Amino acid sequence: MKKTHIPDIKSCNQESSWLYSDIVKDHFFNPRNILIQEKEYQADGIGIVGSPACGDIMVVWILVDARKSTIRECKWRTFGCASAIASTSMMSVMATENGGMSLTQAKHLTPEAIIERLGGLPDRKYHCSVLGHQALREAIEDYQNSQLKKKDV
Amino acid sequence: MTKNTPQTTIYLDHAATTPLDSEVYEAMLSISGDIYANPSSMHSQGRRAFDILETARKTIATSLNAHAHEIIFTGSGTESDNMALYGVAHAYKKYGTHIIISAIEHKAVLASAHRLEKEGFEVTYLPVNNDGCINIQDCLAAIRPDTTLLSIIYANNEIGTVQPIAELSTALQTLRGNAPTPLLHTDACQAVGMLPVDVQTLNVDLLTVNSSKIYGPKGMGLLYIKDGVRLEPLIVGGSQESGKRAGTENIALAHGFAIALEKSCATHGATSKKLTQLRTHFINGLRSTCPDIILNGHPTKRLANNVHISIPYVEGESLVLLLDTYGICCATGSACSSTDLTPSHVLRAIGITDERIHGSLRFSLGKSTTKEEIDFTVASLSQCIHKLQSITAMPHMYNTNNA
């Protein structure tokens, strides 16, 4: 009979399938555009979405290039799962790449577009964890409301 | 954060399933090629298979202090739980259609109860206190003349709370007198190997054990059914397992299961003593490196191997995946990690907030767990928490411009 040594515990140091795509993993382990010093950050707009009951909470801060009406900086923080972290990170990259997205474009950023750039997400994660675009939209509206108030004064 | 390439696995998810004991594996290998005949066959090869099966049953019966004919082999702990609930509810229907389960039962019991409700049975979900303990008086008060079954988990699989099953059964016996119902079932899947599991002392009518939680093979479980207790089978066909569970028995799995159970029952005292010390060391380590953590479940009436915590403002799935990069395997009750995206019903039943459920982690130690592994886990967890707390957000932390 073949004698096999079976240790109580096997090494995990071997290739195995991952729950998430490589891009999701990359953005989860190395999230981009995290706002670390939020107290000193003078944002032009802030957006908050989510609830812990369903899962995740997300805050997005933006700086706006008022002349070009584009997003100059998009920072965020989240009390969320891996796909929430990765999708918000990717959203912040999309909002700011190539000189920054126009506010109009950014308000219409869809979760599908973010998920496509992430190389997909597990089906069950589709609706609950991709909230970044909503927070971004709120941040833009927050900015636009504050501009209207300035005009009123 | 430095991302280590894991060299070794630190497996702290024994409540999910245990690795296969090497002695059990060898024992199964030694018979699986050679013993192939059907134990129901009359020829000598069939009788060889039958002998191994019945020896396994006797070994198990001895370990649990039961009679061999009271042990029914099944395909899993889940099947045993299903069988206990459906089997008793249907067999005793003429005595009533009401059953009682605790609010923190394993999903195998919970889902069976839900299905029975759809079939017209009534189910009372017995609440537990904030530590996850049932109250025996509440339990007795919930019993009605038409109650046929109580199912109370011996030790909970998530928070490890141990229930006073023997005390409950004594009270139940007094109440029941000579009446055939209500019967008492307990799911002892997590208890075997950690607590004494003696069916005479526990004085239960039905008891579930799962092989894959006690270093035995997967795909194997048992239901202890006390002499005289009737049960309508779930799976019908041949008259295997005293007509209670049809289908050709898996001899190798039964053989392995018996060895695993015998070992677990014989060593539970030493195992739980060792693991209680490690658990205390673990909790103390966690409290000194991450003072914010909260221990969920009862401080002492819990399984020796269970450490269930909540970490403020850090999500559980993220933590599990980060710890995985250190080679550390654990679990979370966070909705994000469950396939149905709902927070754990057990954690909700003990009244902890959604935020705390969102940041919950379960470490379940095993017989091979070492102090060094625990120390490495504490240090790694502290790094993971630090990383996630540095990117976390809670609405009350911020004052928005339009607030």
Image: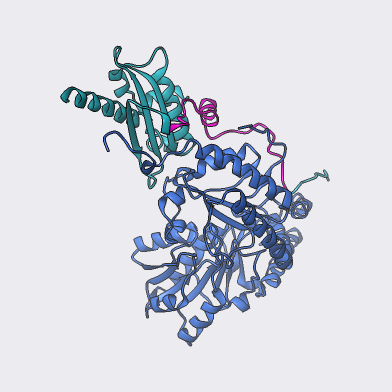
Chain colours: A cyan, B blue
Dominant secondary structure, magenta:
loop
Q: Quadrant of residue B196?
A: bottom right
**Any part of residue B262 in sight:** no
- Of B102 and A78, nearer the camera is A78
Task: Say whether residue A140 is left or right of residue B376.
Answer: left
Task: Say whether residue B84 is left or right of residue B72.
Answer: left
**Any part of residue A42 in sight:** yes
Q: Name the quadrant of the N terminus of chain B.
A: top right
Task: Say whether residue B13 is left or right of residue B151.
Answer: right
Residue B382 is one of the magenta-drawn residues: no
Residue B220: percent from the left, percent from the top?
Answer: 62, 56
Residue A72: percent from the left, percent from the top?
Answer: 38, 18
As displayed, is residue B16 above or below residue A108?
below
Q: Name the quadrant of the C terminus of chain B.
A: top left
Residue A28 is one of the magenta-drawn residues: yes
As displayed, is residue B330 above or below residue A43?
below
- Of B71 and B320, nearer the camera is B320
- Of B147 and B383, nearer the camera is B383
Which residues make up the magenta segment? A9-38
Residue B288: percent from the left, percent from the top?
Answer: 61, 52
